[in-house]
Amino acid sequence: MDWFLGAADQVSDFRRELARYLSRHGAPGSDGAIADAKLVASEAVGNAIRHTGGPVWVSLSWTTELPVLQVLDIGPGFDTASLTPTKDHPVQGPGSGVRAEAERTLETLRLDAESGRGLLIMKALAPEVEVTLRKHAGVLVTMRLPVPRRRAVSINPPRRHSGVLPALQEAQPEGGFGKESFLRALVVQLSRTVEEQHGPDAAETAVAQVGTDVGGQMEAEFRLAEEITGRLTPEELGRCYVRLKRAIDGDFRVVEASVERIVLENTRCPFGDTVRRAPALCRMTSSVFGGIAARNSEVGASVLLEERIAVGDPGCRVVVYLSPPPAEVEPFAHHYLPPSSAP
């Protein structure tokens, strides 16, 4: 990752971005190390901007256990080759005026007299710190940050040889599989794998979460298209369901829409016949429909998947209850809480 910082007020944003990056790739339990890394990096960048006026180029690479951060102030060049000065071995070379200023800059990096920070803090918290004068590019500070990288877990499952998507006949004439075939295969195979490794409940739970998130975006798009701001009525809910399903090549239609329930039927699954291999994907429809209905209700909603193509029925029949379902239906429906009651 790289950052180009031109002013001191950009340091706080840089520090937050750096912390998020380290959190994504760092080993579990690295919170303390990340806090140290943020301090070290902000000291290096802050000093560079404060004492040179900026701009500063910052680069982070992480190919080994510890990340390497480089902070380069794009200041005046020097007449000698790149050196790594220390307090006991100052930079030598022609241009004594410029050289003296460079040494003063490096000494400021070692210990900022006003704040008591600088290279002292960097060396205390970072495993390695090196300050280098570059011939044509100012001062370069290179350090290893004290955050270990998350170790990779090798997984090498055996390949399946039957019933795997995408089907070979879906290949395009010019070669390869199209995006639609690939994405459909990705969803179906992921659902099948979760079900095989963790059981059908785990697969349905994962699919339900995806459906809730995606359904929220589909509801937002419908509201924008129809300029609706209040709660959706049963008729509007029905139109929303049909709109979002037809957009992904489903064939739903509303059979009934009342204050008690919405009944929909479907003759074509967006996943095609392949849905029979991953019936947990039906929870996507339940979660999308139920989540939208619950967000527009004070009492929540319930969804009964009465008939499903995925289990061999000729079509789908979905009943969305906008009030508590009948007692005989309740054990077989999926229930969704209103926003005020959701955990």
Image (cartoon, rainbow, N blue to C red):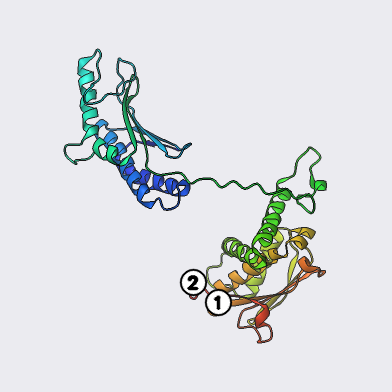
Residue located 66% across and 65% down the image: 199
Foreground label between 1 and 2? 2
Residue located 62% across and 72% down the image: 290
Residue located 23% across and 28% down the image: 105
Q: Give the residue number, with chain letter if any, for mark 2.
A: 343
Q: Earlier in the sequence, mark 1 or mark 2?
A: 1
Residue 111 % position (x, y): 21, 35
Judged from the image, the secondary structure of the residue bearing numbered disc 1 is loop
On the image, which quarter does residue 315 sit in?
bottom right
Residue 220 % position (x, y): 56, 62
Residue 281 % position (x, y): 69, 63
Q: In this rendering, would 112 be left or right of 220?
A: left
Q: Which mark is residue 297?
A: 1
Q: In this rendering, would 236 be left or right of 278?
A: left
Q: Quadrant of the N terminus?
A: top left
Nearest the eye: 115 or 214: 115
